[in-house]
Image: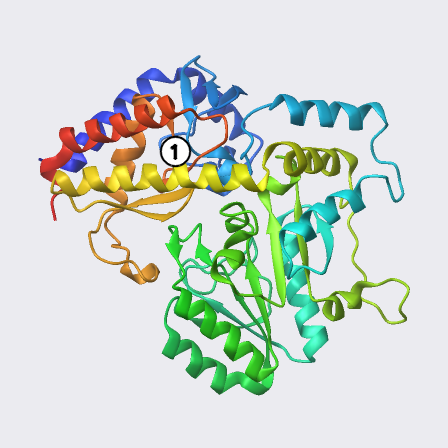
């Protein structure tokens, strides 16, 4: 079976089924470069134009309905227009937005977050995970008086802190040291080499955008030890992984970072980010202290995000719900992998809980260099196949569950994957 030929047929069918999306995309190119203002959402031959969403469902401009298995790249934990979230946002709107001062909500959300993450003794809000990581780096450099930041290839810490293929020309010009994810010996050697200048070790406990590559417990524990020994700060980027347990991946591992960055779902689906950690580090931002670090942001404490975040953490995504929800995700991933093995394919789904990613290799994936450079054809085939069956996933094979998805929805997804391996199995063998 020629997978390229099969993919071409799926793409042609996609074009034929989506004339309105194509038309809207072509119009957008007249006012935005490539018709796009968020790179991850673009794909050939043109991206879908989504018209509306409700619960776990989406409808595109041509009226096609999809089960949403992408969940706004983890920010959409609560689905589309959850009634409790809507009520909270409406209450905030009724009280007036942009109040130009401290409001009655920000400390409530801060208390909810710090109660979930004991290592976060103090925190401040931002509008994105990108901002949170930028400010965590600034704090680490100021606190330690050092300049270098150890990061890992395949990592993603925001639009200007991306290391998918190493260094990126769009990155902010910090002095980065680039390591290999899950390589304990390599990380130890880099820390030893740069110990006197190392301000922070910035790491995702699971590389999300890098393909849901799970950080080995020993590797992450060793980073904690190395940071402590050298006086650098260990920063856990839990923008994605914070949803995997009531207290994030750090709670599951029993590792207390010096700082944690957060984002995505904690703002109830609104624009959100946060950074926090040790009280002595966060004291750098205390405006009562002479020489403090300034931290601006007109919408840092906006009432819509604060209200939605409070409602989400206190009334919907309780610790009990988080545990049960991620257990459902683990069960689905195990079913998908069992199907891939039983059909004799080279496919596997990596990840934890409600976050997973398809890969076209049966081997262990420790870091991004273990991912075959040629797997994009299989991922494209999977993407267009799932769209044709009414499921919306990321082009790169990223799959995210949201709370409104039912067990029947998960069964249907598994059935669509079974149809995929049955249809293309000959071309998916190792």
The N terminus lies in quadrant? top left
Residue 149 drawn at (x, y percent): 56, 72
Question: Does residue 62 appear anywhere in the picture?
Answer: yes
Could you tell me residue 9's position as x and y percent? 21, 26
Q: Secondary structure at mark 1?
A: loop
Image quarter of residue 164:
bottom left
Residue linked to disc 1: 393
The chosen color scheme is: rainbow
Q: Nearer the viewer, residue 42 or 225?
A: 225
Image: 192 above or below 210: below
Tell me, yes or no, if residue 33 can be seen here.
no
Picture residue at 60% right of the left edge, 23% below the top: 81
Q: Position of residue 324 (x, y in %)?
A: 46, 38
Is the residue 145 above or below the residue 209 in the image?
below
| Image coords of residue 364 (percent x, y) | 25, 58
Apparent side of residue 340 relative to residue 150 in the rendered image (left or right): left
Instruction: Check the image and name the residue furthest to the top.
Output: 63
Q: Within 10 angstroms of label 1, few (less than 14), some, or many (20 or more) residues?
A: many
**Residue displayed at 13% across by 36% down:** 425
275 with respect to 3 (left or right)? right
Q: Is residue 362 above or below residue 231?
A: above
Q: Nearer the viewer, residue 364 or 178?
A: 364
Please identify the quarter of the rendering in which residue 345 is found: top left
């Amino acid at each position: 079976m020629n997978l390229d030929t099969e993919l071409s047929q799926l793409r042609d069918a996609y074009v034929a089924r989506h004339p309105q999306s194509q038309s809207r995309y072509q119009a957008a190119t007249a006012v935005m470069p490539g018709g796009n203002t968020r790179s991850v959402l673009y794909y050939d031959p043109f991206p879908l134009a989504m018209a509306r969403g409700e619960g776990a469902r989406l409808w595109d401009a041509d009226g096609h309905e999809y089960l949403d298995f992408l969940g706004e790249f983890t920010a959409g934990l609560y689905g589309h227009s959850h009634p409790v979230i809507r009520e909270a946002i409406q209450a905030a709107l009724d009280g007036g937005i942009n109040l130009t001062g401290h409001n009655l909500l920000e400390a409530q959300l801060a208390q909810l977050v710090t109660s979930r993450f004991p290592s976060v003794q103090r925190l401040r809000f931002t509008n994105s995970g990108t901002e949170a990581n930028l400010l965590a780096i600034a704090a680490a450099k100021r606190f330690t008086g050092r300049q270098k930041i150890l990061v890992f290839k395949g990592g993603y810490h925001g639009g200007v802190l991306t290391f998918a293929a190493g260094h990126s020309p769009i990155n902010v010009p910090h002095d980065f040291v680039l390591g290999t994810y899950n390589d304990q010996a390599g990380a130890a050697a880099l820390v030893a080499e740069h110990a006197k200048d190392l301000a922070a070790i910035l790491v995702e406990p699971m590389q999300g955008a890098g393909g849901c590559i799970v950080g080995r417990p020993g590797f992450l524990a060793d980073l904690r030890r190395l940071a402590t020994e050298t006086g650098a700060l260990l920063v856990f980027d839990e923008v994605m992984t914070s949803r995997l347990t009531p207290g994030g991946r750090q709670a599951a591992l029993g590792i207390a970072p010096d700082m944690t960055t957060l984002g995505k779902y904690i703002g109830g689906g609104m624009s959100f980010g946060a950074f926090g950690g040790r009280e002595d580090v966060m004291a750098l931002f205390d405006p009562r202290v002479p020489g403090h670090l300034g931290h601006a942001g007109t919408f840092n404490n906006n009432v819509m995000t604060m209200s939605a975040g409070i409602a989400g953490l206190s009334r919907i995504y309780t610790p009990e719900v988080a545990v049960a929800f991620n257990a459902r995700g683990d069960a689905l991933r195990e079913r998908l992998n069992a199907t891939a093995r039983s059909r004799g394919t080279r496919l596997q789904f990596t990840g934890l809980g409600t976050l997973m990613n398809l890969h076209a290799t049966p081997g262990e994936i420790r870091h991004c260099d273990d991912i075959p450079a040629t797997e994009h054809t299989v991922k494209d085939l999977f993407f267009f196949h799932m769209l044709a069956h009414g499921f919306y996933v990321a082009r790169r094979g990223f799959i995210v569950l949201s709370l409104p998805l039912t067990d029947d929805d998960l069964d249907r997804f598994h059935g669509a994957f079974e149809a995929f391996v049955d249809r293309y199995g000959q071309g998916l063998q190792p």
